[in-house]
Image: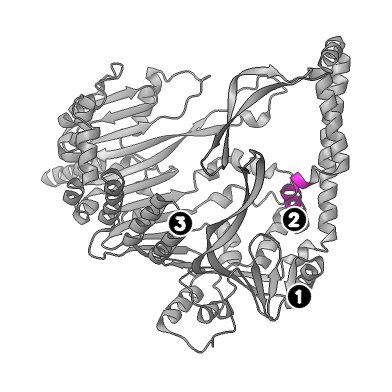
Amino acid sequence: MKKYLLLVSAFLLTLFLSAQDIKNYIPEKVNYIVKIDGQRINNNVNFDIIRSSEMYKDFIFKMLNNKTAEQRAIIKLFETPDETGLNIKSHMYLYEIPQEVKKSAKASSYDDEDYYQPKTRSITVVAIPLLNNKNFTNFIKDVYHDNSKVKVMKFAKGMNYMNVNNSNLIIWNAEKVFFCKLPYRSYYDKEYSKADIKTFIKSIAFPIEHKSILSNSKVLNALGKDSDVSYIFTSNVWSEMPYMFNEINREKNVKDTAIFNQDLFKDNYSFSYINFENGEIVFTGNQFYGKKLAGIIDPIFNLKPSAKLGNILYQTPVTSYISYAFSLTEVQKFVDKTFTYSMDTILIEYIRDSQNNLFETDSVINKYRVEIDSIDFLVNGPKQTVDVLDLETITDSGTVYTDEERDNYDYYSYDSGADKAKYEHESLNWYQIDSLEARQDSLYVLIDDRKDTLAVRTYQSLGIKGDELWSIFNGEFLILYHAMTTVEKKSKEYEMDAEYNYVEVEKTKKVPMPLYSFALTINNNVMFKKYLNIMLQKGFIQKEKNRYLVVLGEMNQYIWASDTMCIITNDNNFNPSKRSATTKSDYELTNFNRVTNHQSGAYIEVGKILASSVQFVEDKETAEVLEILAKYFDETIYYTTFDENTNMNTKTDVVFNDEKINSLNSIYAMFNEMYVHFTKK
C-alpha cells in the first residue's frame, strides 16, 4: 500500500511540475518561440548603473510624473519589478500560435477563388511566471485604471482574465500570466464573443496533454541551451498550409510543381541565440534542413571561397571585408529545372524596367499617349488641377530658395476647348464611351508590347546570350573596404543676378564616398574575355595600361582582369599586383583563414570606419553622433559554415571597446551619452 501511495505521489508530483513548466503550455505547432533568460541577464547586467543614469532619471521622474495609477505602475515595473508580481528573473517565453480560418463561401461565380482559400491567423503570446498573484492583480488594475471598460473577470477557480478592447487578452492564475495579442479582426468581421474568449483561454492557459513542445526533443534541446535570448523557428506549420505552395505552383513561370510542396517545408529548424557578454554581443545560430530542402541548398551553398580569392587580402591594405561562396552553375540547374524563364528573359525584363522612362520618349509610344489623352479628354471632360503657389525666399547672398505650397482650393485648368469638350462629353452615349474606353485599354497593351519590343532590341544590340553568363564566374566573391574619401558632386542652383534675373549656376559639393574593391573568380576565361571585348566595342569601358576604365556613371571605376580573377574598384591607387603574395602578416593570415574556412564571412572594423567618417560629414550633429558611436564600437566578425549533413552554423561577434563592461551596459551608456550630449548642452 505504501509503495502504491509513493507511486501515486510521484505521478501527481510529475503532473504538478509539468503544469508549472511554461513549455507544457506551448503547442508543438507554433510559428516561432523566443525564450528570454531573465535570471542570466540580471546576473550579468548592472542595472544599478542604468538606474543612476541621466536618461533613466529623466524618463522615470520627468516623463512619468507619478500622478496617475498607470504611471505609478510603470515606475514600479522599472524601479521595483518584484512588487508587480512578475517574476522577470525567470524563463519568459514569446510564441505565436497559428489559428486556421475556415474557407469562406463564394458570393458568386465571378469571385476570385484564391480569396476564399483557408488562411491562417495567429495568436501572439507572452508567458511569464508570477511571484505573487495578488500583487500582479493590483499591478494590472493600475495599468488599465483609466480604461473603465477593462475589468478583471473570473474564468475558473484561481484564474482571472482581462479582455482589452477585444484585441488583447490577459490571463493569469497563481503561477503564471499570459499576455495575448488576438488574431486581427477586420472591419467586416464580428467582434469576439464571450464563447470565443473562453475558447482562447482554454487553448492558451491550460497545460497541453498531447503534442506540446515537450514532445519535440529537437526543440526542447534547443530551448535548453544556456543563453540570454533563444529564438526557435520551424517550418513544419507551413507544411500543413497547402494553399501557400499551391499559390506558388499556380504561377505561370513555375515549370516543376513537384518542388514546392509540403515536403519542402518539413523538418526545417532554425535555432538562434543571443548572449550579452562582457565586451561583446555574441549571436550564434544553427539551421537544420529537412531532406528535400537540404538537397537544394547543399550543391548551391555548401562551398568555401578559394585560396586565390583569399589571396587578395595579401595584395591590398584592407580594414574590412565581406566574403561569400555559392555555385552559379548549380543555381542555373535549379532555375532551368524549376522555372520556365531563362537568363535572357530576366535580363530583358531588367532592361525594360530600368529603361522605362527612356522608352517613353519613343515616337510610337508618344503617339499612343496622345490618343489616350484625347480619349480621356473626350470622355471625362477637362481635368481638375491644383494651383501651386511658389514661396520664394531670397537670402542676402542673392540665392533663391523655392518652396511649393498647395492651395486649399481646386480650380479647373483653363483650356480654350473646354466648353466644346464638355458638350461632346455630355452628348456621348454609353456605347460610344464603352468603345472609346476599349480603345484606350488596347492602347495601353500596345504601349506595353512596344516597350517589350524596344527592350528586346536593346538587349540584342548588346550581343549578350543569357545562358553564357551563368558560366563566366564561379559565384564566390570578396568585397573589400579600403578607406573613406570625398568626391565632388555637381549640382545646379538658381541665383538672382544684380538685375534681379534668375541665373543658372553650377556648384560643386564634396560628398563622402567609400573606396572599395569587388573581386570575383573567373570560371570560363574565354567567355569572360568575349564580354570584356563587347564592353570595349560598345564604349562602356576603355583600355588603360594594365586595367580598364569604366566610363558609365559619375565616379570612375576600374576593372583589373587576369585569367582567373576580375576585380572592380573605385580606388585609383589600388593595384593588385603591387605587393608580393609571399609577404603575409599575422593580421593577413587571420583574415585569409576566415575567408577560406567559411562559406561566408565578414570582418568589419566598425569603430575605425565611424571615426574616419567624421571628417567627411558636414552636418555637425551627425558628426557628433558618429564620434560617440566610434568610442563604443570596435569590430564585428561574422561567419557561416556547413557540416557534413548540410546543417548550417553561424556566428557573429559584435565587439565593444570596453571589454570589462557588459555589452548591454555599453549600449545603454552609449545612448545615455547621446541623450546627455544633445539635451543637456
Report if the CB atoms under discs 1 and 3 are less than 8 Å apart: no
List the single residue furthest toward the left: 2
**Numbered disc 2: secondary structure:** helix
Camera-nearest residue between 84 and 210: 84
Task: Based on the picture, tell me whether residue 599 belongs to the magenta stretch.
Answer: no
- Quarter of the image that includes the N terminus: top left
Name which of mark 2 and mark 1 comes first in the sequence. Answer: 2
Residue numbers of the magenta segment: 348-358
Can you tell which quarter of the image residue 176 is in?
A: top left
Res 347 label: 2
Res 617 label: 3
Q: Residues within 10 Å of mark 3 (few under 14, many from 20)?
A: some
User: Where does the image place residue 230, in percent across and percent down from the top left?
Assistant: 35, 52
Of tags 3 and 2, the one toward the viewer is 3
Give the residue number, with chain letter if any, for mark 1.
Answer: 529
Name which of mark 3 and mark 2 comes first in the sequence. Answer: 2
Q: Using residue 202 as the reference point, say whether residue 484 is left or right of it.
A: right
Task: In the rendered view, tell whether residue 524 sits above or below residue 65.
Answer: below
Task: Based on the picture, tell me whether residue 353 belongs to the magenta stretch.
Answer: yes
**Numbered disc 1: secondary structure:** helix
Tally of numbered tags: 3
Q: Amino acid at mark 1?
A: Lys
Q: Amino acid at mark 2?
A: Leu
Task: In the rendered view, tell whether residue 494 sits above or below residue 167.
Answer: below
